[in-house]
Image: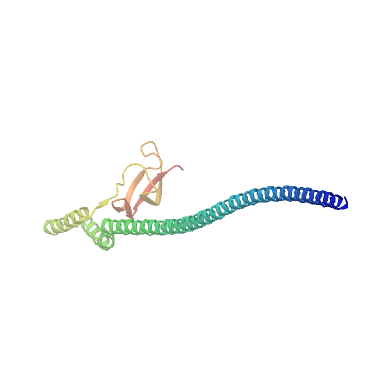
């Protein structure tokens, strides 16, 4: 009897032990499943972290690429700005040289124009000194012709000389100034006056004391005249 009880007790203890083992195994299994689930969640989290890290890396690469492109763009802008500055400087220098050339060219034209005018003036009035040297001789011939008692041959000879000198002066553009009619202070010089009357109006020429001559539009000497004036 006692042996049976002992056997039953042993069986009950074995049963309880088995149940405890089963329970522990069940708990261990649940724990394992929880660990597996936790591991799975950790793996998913890790994958998410990896994905996020990958995305962050790609974003960083994009930022780096963008920075690189921005740097290249900045360098291009700096280069273009430098080229523009050099171009503007070259254009400014070109304009300066052009202005200098235009000034020099204008100055050369002025010098050439003045030289041409001077040559023309010299050519036009080249006989001025010669005329001034000849005119006294022509005056003397006129005075000689006014002397009474000249023989015909002498008078004719003087007239031929006078005509030759006058023609020579005309060929050089030298002409006698008209001294009849009204007095003109631009061409005449009054050395004496006479009373004006009905037949001889005021400011008219009464007598020519010395003939005047001009070279083209230049007065070599004015005509010396006597002028009628009001009393």
- 121 with respect to 201 (left or right): left
The image quarter in which residue 157 lies: bottom left
- 33 with respect to 73 (left or right): right
Nearer to us in this view, 202 or 129: 129
Residue 73 image point, x, y percent: 51, 53
Count every numbered label the image shows and give the total.
0
Q: From this viewpoint, is residue 101 visible?
A: yes
- Here the colouring is rainbow
Q: From this viewpoint, is residue 211 visible?
A: no
Residue ranking furthest to the right: 2
Nearer to us in this view, 27 or 35: 27
Residue 176 image point, x, y percent: 27, 51
Residue ranking furthest to the front: 1
Residue 122 image point, x, y percent: 28, 59
The image quarter in which residue 206 lies: top left
Please determine whether, in this image, residue 11 is positioned above or below residue 199.
below
Residue 155 image point, x, y percent: 15, 57
Residue drawn at 85 percent across, 53 percent down: 3
Residue ranking furthest to the top: 198
Nearer to us in this view, 50 or 103: 50
Nearer to us in this view, 211 or 22: 22
């Amino acid at each position: 009897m006692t042996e049976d009880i002992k056997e039953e007790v042993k069986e009950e203890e074995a049963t309880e032990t088995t149940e405890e083992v089963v329970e522990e195994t069940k708990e261990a299994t649940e724990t394992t499943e929880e660990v597996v689930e936790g591991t799975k969640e950790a793996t998913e989290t890790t994958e998410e972290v990896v994905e996020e890290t990958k995305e962050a890396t790609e974003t960083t690469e994009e930022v780096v690429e963008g920075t690189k492109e921005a740097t290249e763009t900045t360098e291009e802008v700096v280069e273009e700005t430098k080229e523009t500055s050099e171009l503007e400087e070259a254009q400014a220098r070109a304009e300066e040289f052009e202005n200098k050339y235009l000034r020099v060219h204008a100055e050369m034209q002025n010098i050439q124009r003045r030289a041409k005018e001077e040559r023309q003036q010299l050519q036009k009035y080249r006989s001025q000194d010669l005329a001034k040297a000849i005119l006294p001789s022509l005056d003397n011939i006129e005075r000689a012709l006014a002397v009474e008692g000249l023989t015909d041959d002498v008078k004719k000879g003087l007239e031929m000389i006078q005509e030759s000198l006058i023609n020579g002066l005309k060929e050089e553009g030298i002409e006698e100034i008209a001294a009849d009619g009204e007095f003109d202070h631009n061409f005449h010089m009054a050395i004496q006056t006479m009373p004006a009357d009905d037949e001889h109006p005021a400011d008219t020429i009464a007598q020519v004391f010395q003939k005047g001559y001009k070279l083209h539009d230049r007065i070599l000497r004015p005509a010396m005249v006597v002028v009628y004036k009001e009393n």
